[in-house]
Image: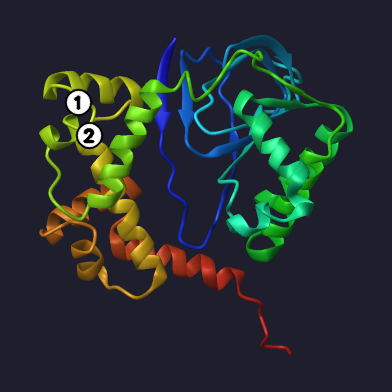
Amino acid sequence: MQYIYENFTFPPDQSFTVRSEILEIKKYAALKSHINFEIALLENCSGKRFIGDHIEDFNGPELVLLGSYVPHCWQYYQLIDPLISPQAVVIHFFPNFLGKELLEKPEAKQLNILFEKAAKGVLFTGSTLHTAKMIMHQMVFVSGLTRIALMIRLLDILSQSETSSVLSSPFYNTVENSGEAKKINKVFDHIFQNFRNDITLQEVADLIPMSSAAFCRFFKRNTNRTLIDFVKEVRIGHAAKLLLEGHYNVAEASYNSGYNNISNFNKHFKEIKGLSPRDFMKQYEDKENLLKPNTSNV
């Protein structure tokens, strides 16, 4: 089965992400892996679960916590209720999303234990699944401190769960089995630090080290994208962050994201985001205005 290493960038106003999506009933052929931790809730579907070296049939709903670089995949075979769409709620985060000081508190002992178990994947059932499911559905529709409070509540419930089980075998070690992930992450780190400058294929290939041709095959196989496409995504992601922060205009965001040609920037921005930079900002401003309370009658 193919491995694909993913990279996620968080919006500037979020320290973690929550998304809800409709699942497609099909047999996916690729194991995915990423540096972020993941909490995945799957509903109204059955199939086969692949987590690390663990393979098992599942019959939803199910809730799984994954640590950094844990290869994972769900193959969806059929619906449980044919009248309802299969759905997933997925949270991506880093353990220190509220600062590493929190994890150093004595009250966080169980949470740290949970994060250690996440390196092998953790499945939650019973009352934990029921309670966590309600919280995660709430998180989809709220933002700000309300979402953070729910996230803390969710992690507390998972860390205190008496109905959880570690999925991968005791012999499975994510670090030992993530040689290619380490190479990819080395490339990611280099790009994140240097994306404002010109990045050549050879300088990145030398990090591994590999020939340019071998690196192109390696990077495409493991990320499902070319190096040029990935650099483009990083630059546009950074530009979008600068625009949403409100301190830079389009030309400044373009220059500070590694572009010297504004027309090229506009082309790439629309390609990645589906909107021009100005339309992207306007859409964000419109959403912000909708969320503001109406005080006209106060």
Which three-letter amino acid code belongs to the residue tagged 2? Leu
Few, some or many residues within 10 Å of mark 1 (<14, 14–19, 20+): few
Where is residue 256 drawn, in percent x and y? Answer: 22, 64
Q: Quadrant of the N terminus?
A: top left
Q: Quadrant of the C terminus?
A: bottom right
Residues under numbered marks 1 and 2 in contact, where contact means CB atoms less than 8 Å apart: no
Where is residue 60 drawn, in percent x and y? Answer: 74, 21
Q: What residue is at 48 percent from the left and 20 percent from the top?
A: 176
Q: Where 172 falls versus 275 (above or below)?
A: above
Which three-letter amino acid code belongs to the residue tagged 1? Pro
Q: Where 39 falls versus 220 (above or below)?
A: below
Callout 1 secondary element: loop
Which residue lies under the disc numbered 2?
227
Q: Is residue 276 visible?
A: yes
Q: Which mark is residue 209?
A: 1
C-alpha separation, residue under disc 1 versus residue under disc 2: 15 Å
Where is residue 52 drawn, in percent x and y? Answer: 57, 17
Callout 2 secondary element: helix
Where is residue 54 drawn, in percent x and y? Answer: 63, 12
Give the quadrant of residue 25: top right
Q: Is residue 78 visible?
A: no
Choose between 213 and 253: the one closer to the eye: 213
Q: What residue is at 59 percent from the left and 36 percent from the top?
A: 38
Give the quadrant of residue 66: top right
Which mark is in front, 1 or 2?
1
Q: Tag 2 or tag 1, which sits nearer the N-term?
A: 1
